[in-house]
Structure formats: structure tokens, C-alpha cells
Amino acid sequence: MEEHMNLLTTVLERYGGDPEALVEILRDLSQENGYVSQDLLVAVADRLRLPRSHVHSVASFYSMISVEPRGRHTVQMCQDAPCHVAGGREVWQALEEALGIHFGETTPDGEWTLQITSCLGLCSVGPVITIDGEVYGNMTPTKVQELLGHYRGGCCGGNQGGAA
Amino acid sequence: MAYRANILISSAAPGAQEVEQALLDKIYEHHLDNEVQVMQAATLGPQLQGVELVIYPEGTHYVHLTPEDARVIVEEHLLKGRPVERLMFKGIEVEPLEAPASKEIRVVLRNVGKIDPGNIDDYIAVDGYAALGKVLTEMTPEQVLEELKRSGLRGRGGAGFPTHLKWTFARNAPGDAKFVICNGDEGDPGAFMNRRVLEGDPHAVIEGMAIAAYVIGARQGYFYVRAEYPIAISTLRIAIQQARDYGLLGENILGTDFSFDLEVRMGAGAFVCGEETALMQSIEGARGMPTTRPPFPATKGLWAKPSNINNVETYANVPQIILNGGGWFASMGTEKSKGTKTFAIAGKVKRTGLIEVPLGVTIREIVYDVGGGILNDKKFKAVQTGGPMGGCIPEKYLDLPVDYENLAKVGSIMGSGGFVVMDEDTCMVDIARFFMEFTQDESCGKCVPCRVGTRRMLEILTDICEGRGQPGDIERLEAMAKYIARASLCGLGQGAPNPVLSTIEHFRDEYEAHIYEKRCPAKVCKPLIEYVIDPETCIGCTRCARNCPVNAIAGKPKQTHVIDPSVCVRCGICKQVCPVNAISIESKGKLPEA
């Protein structure tokens, strides 16, 4: 809890405690904490002197702000037309099958969250997925298997080259 | 310090970091760091070819690079002076950076991939900020507007509203504080032209905004960029700081009494925020929901102050128009659509990527001359322009000159310039369903016709794709489309039915095949297709049966295999693994039950 509040203080300072930066503040909290808990939402409202209803309405509106806990790894897939016509459907199915969950869900062991992302503008190398923010293009069902294997095997980032 | 060689690397490409690291390591290893300079240039050339780099002064262009390739390039090209033939770009007959494909003219993209976006001096060296200087010292706001009017520049965000009029409204609106906003919330799937400009030439946009601010009388500007573009955002922030350091932003710019500064605001993943009123709500820290117009932003925009909002590409055109004159700009394009337009070609073409062509080139020229034709030489079926609010244009319009009016005439829109090419293997009903899923998902929920109507339409389309279509469905879709378009507040709802309407108009036979014959002519819709093994071709290798995830394939080794359609989940793995291409997809359809 205290850790959360320290994070909140850091993020608020980043934006000078400006209530107009609410969208950015919530997005940063979501990214850095994994999600914005109910406690955090209330704390944001109090610190920015905004109605709790307003903070909640903004948090629940934007897809990059999560109010639900997420898995250790987040896989996002672009589901837009260029990726779709380039074989995205098969990649989509491969991801759901490999992780045993549907899009929008988190695995029961808390390891994986599968999400849809809007277009990342990398349409020339579609289908595109991201794992923990790292982008992978030209995906195929076979590559999905390999990639997930990387993440399952090592501690993190498949191609980050010994960043640990 | 002069460098012997300058390397531009496409730092935005997936995997670029590793390649760049390998490159740098090797350069240091051979003590070349005083001779060779490596610069990050987001993306290079007209298409993304994996990780790319260009070595100047020769201009050698390497593509699809791995870290190992980078090491080879340092040792061979830089150290021994032997260009590595096998890694070089061999796409088009012309050098993509020096001379773009023959139909291309670069105005907005002229600096992208050629200058270091992280260095303002590079931009100044190519006449950067000269237009701003000219405007501030030699031109009145009226003269700028006159030049813009002569150029015929229209908004590049989609609607194509004349830019000089928009600026005039904001200029004439009474108000003590005014704002200039750049819409960088490029959310249309398949459209990434703004990302390229922001990552490759951010100062051109900043300069365009500063000129707009001078004309309308604003002191403060906002860049609204979607958070999906982290590189664009960091490039932009660096560019803004450099412009401040040079006195090109801030108080008393270039010694005049004009002051202007910029702030970057990020989105958080909401497509509707590309709509101007929703975008301003988002900047103010609220839910990005559109508001009623009028009042238009020009009179009552951000924080209820007069605001001018334009797209990235619109602003990027402005400095060029000031420097070269409105007449120069108007000499390109068609009667009502002047200048050039960037398009993002995606889908089933040989060369995907960004292009910039004068308005008025035909769809055929874009698909075949610039895009290199359809992938695997299949048949062209349609092109989807203008993003999820656009329409699908069929083959018979291949020779249609592309401009705002013509696209509208055939049921589509210019939009921000998405250009998704579809071949004969694309099911148009599936595509319509797909776009409806997108709008349904992105509808902000404020207007009932959009929120509920798109859902109803999606349900009907899903039924059709899954073999539950009913006679009358097409007419129901058409009727609902009309109501949704008419009764929604913003462009999202108004345009949401377009993909459905245009596919019904141009591909009605496909809808009918799905509904009446339960058949998918393109063999895409899973419930309507079957995988079939050709007994003549099958060699009984058992590979399909072993790979089938649901054990739907029976057969002994060396004997013909058979797929049980009631068990088959149509995953297509068997077709992929068959060594003799014995498996095909069929959609024979069923006669209506009596």
C-alpha cells in the first residue's frame, strides 16, 4: 500500500500535480503498477481534488488504463485490418490456444494477460504482437510458439540479449 | 568533426536495438567511432524492410538486418570498403531514398529518412524554419492566409476542409487566449503516415504549427499524440526542446514580438479521441467523448477558447507552401484536391509501406506501379481506403483518379490515407463484419444509434458469416446504416456504416451467396467451408493426421486420408503441412432447407 502511494507521489510530481493531466497520470500508474487499484483511484481523486466518479469514469474509458490486475507478462495483439488480412486470424487463434485463455483474460496462474491493442502503425510487418511492450512483427502461429517458449524459458525479454 | 561515413538506422523497426548495438560494438571494436557516425532515423525508405540502414555518402541501403549482418557490414563495408551485395536493398529499380518510385513526389516526406530528426541543425540545413522566419518578418497573417488559399491545401486528417478557411475562422473568433492543436492521434488501422513524419521530421510539423499560431493569434499549442507511438513522442519532445534552445519556440521568437510554445499530450488508447472535440476533452483530462458542433473548435474549442486543430500532415505541408508559394503546391493534384497525399499501403501488395503521390493518380498506379502489384500475382479484388469509416472500392474503379471528391462518389473517403489492398482470397462480408467489430468496440457510447446500432449490425453480419443469414438481412443492414449515419454526433458514428454499405453496393453477390446458398465464395468464413483431401494427390504420408489438433483426420500410412468435417475445426494446419498440396478448401454451400 505504502509502495503504491510512493508511486503515486512520483507520478503526480511528474505532471506537477495538474488535474488536467489526469489521463497521463492514470496511464502511467497503470503501466508502472500493472493496473490502477480501487485504492489508487480514490487516492488520485483525493490528491487532485477531483470527484471520485470523474476519476473512475476516465480510468474506465481508455483502453491503456487497466482497473483490473494483470498477469506477469502482457501479450498484446493488433487486430486491425492490415494485420488481419496478413494472417492475423491464425496468430490470434494460436495465441488463445497456446495460453488457454481468450483475449481480455488473464491466466489463472497470473502469468499471462492477453489483450487487444489498437493499431501500432507497424502495418508493413503485420501481424504484429507485443510482449511486455517489446514489438514482434511478421508473426505466424509457429513463431508464436517459439516466442512464448522464450518467455517461458528465460526470466524475461526473449530478444533483449541478457539485459538481466 | 567530419565523419568518413554516416549511417542512418531504422530505429523504429522491431529488433533495431539489437542490430544497432551490434553495429556500435563492432565499430568501437575496430576503433572506427571517430570516423563513423550512427544516427537513428525511425524508419527509412518507402517500406519497412525489417531493420534497415543506409550508409552515406555512398547511399548504400541494407535491409532485413540481423545483429550478425550488422557486424559483417562493419567489417566488410566500413573496414575493407567492400559493400555487402547480399544484404543490399533490391526492391525497386530506383533507389528508394534518392528517387522514390516514379509516381511519387515527396513534400511531406521529403526529409524523412534523410535527416537526423534528433538534430535541429539537420532540419535548418534543408531550409528548416526559413518559412517561419519569412512569415514573422515579411508577411502579415492575411498574406499567409492568401498564400494558403492559393495553394488549395485541405485538411489531411480526413474531411478535407480547406485549411485557409479553418484558420480564418479561428483568427476572426473573438477571444483573449487561443490555441493551436496538432492532431497526432492517428488511430486508423493501417495508417502510419503521421508516425513517420513525427519520427522522421518533427520540426516541419512544429514549424507549421508556429505559423498557424502566428496567423490566428495563439501563444500556446498542444500536440496530441497517441501513446501507441512512444518513439514519435520522445522524438517530438527532443525536437521541441531544441527549438526552444534555438529561440524558435518560446518568448519573442526570432526577435519579433511573437511568442509561442508547445506541449505534448499523450492519448491512452481510445480511437474516438482522433475526433477533434473528443480530442480536446481528452487534453482537458476527461473522457474522450465528442461534443455537439456547433460551436466549432474555431470559436469554442479547448477550454472553451477559439482553437485551430489540424492533422500532422496538414501542418507539415505549410512551411513548404510558404517557401515555394501556393501556386507551386496548386500545380500538383486535381481541380479541387491540390498537392500531394501520403498513403499507407498495406494488405496484399508486394511492397507495403508509405508513399506520397500527387492527388489525382489512379488506384491502379498506386497498387501496381508503386505497390508492385498483388502479392503472389493473385487477382485484385478491392481496396479499402479511409480507415474504418471508409469504404471498399472494387476492381471496376481501378482507373479512378484518387481525390477527395472521387473517393466520396464511390462510397469511400480519403480519411487519413489508409490504403488496404485485398485480393481474391478476401471475403467482403467478413471484412465488413471485421470493421463493424472495430467501430462497435471503439464507439464511445454517447449516441445510442452508434452504440446500439453498430452492435445490431455486427450481430447481423456475424450471423451471415456463420451461415445463419436470413432473407431480408441485407435490407435491414441498409436501413440501420441510414439511421446510424444520420443520428450520430461525430464522424465515427456517421462513417461507421460505410464499410457495410460499400461492400453491399459493390459485392452484393457475396452477401447473397452467404445468405441464400450458405456459401463463402472467397472460402474464408469458417462455418461455411470444408477442408478436403484430394484422393488422387494424397500420398498417405500421415503428416496431416499427426498434426491435426482435434484428430479429425483418419487414414493408414500410404493410404488416402479423409477429414471428418463434423470434427474438423478448420484451423488449416493440415493444409500448411501437406507436402504435396493435396488439401483444398471448398465452400459448396447448402440448398435452403424446405
Image (spheres, grey):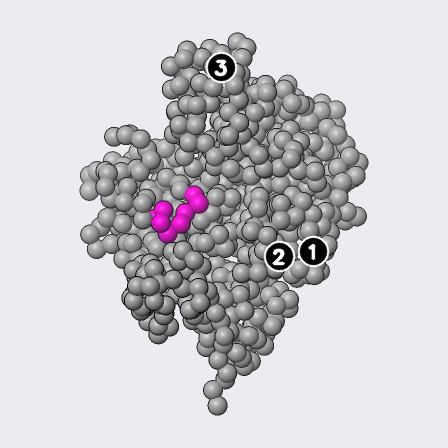
Q: Residues within 10 Å of mark 2 (few under 14, many from 20)?
A: many
- Pointer 1 indicates a residue of which chain? B
Front residue of B562/B157: it is B562
The CA distance from mark 2 to mark 1 is: 9 Å
In primary-sequence order, the first of circles 2 and 1 is: 2
Front disc: 2 or 1: 2
Tags 3 and 1 on a common chain: yes
Asked if the residue at tag 1 contacts the one at tag 2, i.e. Cβ–Cβ closer than 8 Å, the answer is yes
Q: Is residue B303 above or below residue B8?
A: below
Q: Residues within 10 Å of mark 3 (few under 14, many from 20)?
A: few
The CA distance from mark 3 to mark 1 is: 49 Å
User: In x, y percent, where is residue B290?
Assistant: 52, 55
Under circle 1, the secondary element is loop
- Pointer 3 indicates a residue of which chain? B
Q: Residue at x 24, y 54 (%)?
A: A107
Q: Which mark is residue B80?
A: 3
- Find the magenta span and give its range: A137-144
Front disc: 3 or 1: 3
In primary-sequence order, the first of circles 3 and 2 is: 3
Q: Which residue is mark 1?
A: B398
Q: Residues within 10 Å of mark 1 (few under 14, many from 20)?
A: some
Residue type, mark 2 in image? Phe
Q: Which residue is mark 2?
A: B380
What is the quadrant of residue B306 in the picture? top right
User: In x, y percent, where is residue A58?
Assistant: 39, 51
- Pointer 2 indicates a residue of which chain? B
Residue type, mark 3 in image? Lys
Residue type, mark 1 in image? Leu
Front disc: 3 or 2: 3
Q: Is residue A57 visible?
A: no
Q: Residue at x 57, y 46 (%)?
A: B350
